[in-house]
Image (cartoon, grey):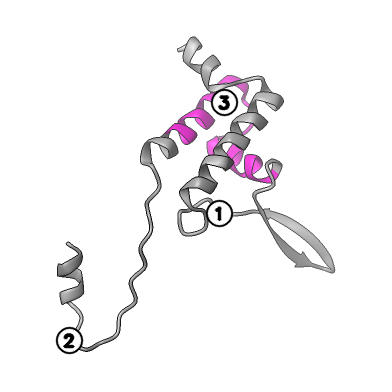
Amino acid sequence: MDRDLIRQFPAGQRIRVELRTGRVPDRLRFYWAFLRNVVEATHCCPNEKILHQLVKLRTGHTDDVIMGGYVIKVPASISFENMDEPTFCRFLDSAIEFIALEFGITPESVERAA
């Protein structure tokens, strides 16, 4: 497949190739399913996307923005482009820890309830 893509460029043209591993889809699906379970169990947020934003703020996964002379923390992206897989694993651990401390829900407690 890669060779076919490269053949689409004219001979002699310079191209840039970036090699990296991809996000583990099962881990990402687990994260979003866990957030949905937390929202269903606690009604802490309107939906899992809002809880995701809260998790990023509370775990420190933020970007700083200066507005009106103040530094404001805004949730940062967890896309693979912005966060490699090992960093996502650490973020996931932090997210699970925050949710356990804040809402008393762990992945294990969700499994037992199912």
Residue plotted at (44% across, 39% down): 28
Q: Residue at image x 21%, y 89%?
A: 12
- Answer with mark 2 or mark 3, whichever residue precedes in sequence: 2
Magenta residues? 30-57
- In this rendering, the answer to whether 13 lies above or below 79 is below
- Residue 107 falls left or right of residue 23: right
- Asked if the stretch drawn in magenta spans residue 11, the answer is no
The quadrant of the rendering that contains the C terminus is top left
Q: Is residue 27 visible?
A: yes
Q: At 68% from the left edge and 45% from the top edge, which residue is drawn?
A: 57
Relative to 95, residue 108 above or below = above
Q: Residue at x 33, y 71 (%)?
A: 17
Q: Which residue is mark 1?
A: 77
Q: Does 44 sit left or right of 34 as displayed? A: right
Mark 2 falls on what kind of element?
Answer: loop
Where does the image place residue 77, in percent across and percent down from the top left? 55, 54
Distance between the alpha carbons at the discs numbered 2 and 3? 53 Å
- Classed neighbour count for the residue bearing mark 2: other residues with Cα under 10 Å, few (<14), some (14–19), many (≥20): few
The residue lying toward the viewer, choosing from 94 and 51, is: 94
Q: Tell me the mark number nearer the camera, choosing from 3 and 1.
A: 1
Count residues near mark 3 (Cα–Cα under 10 Å), then give few for <14, some for 14-19, many for 20+. many
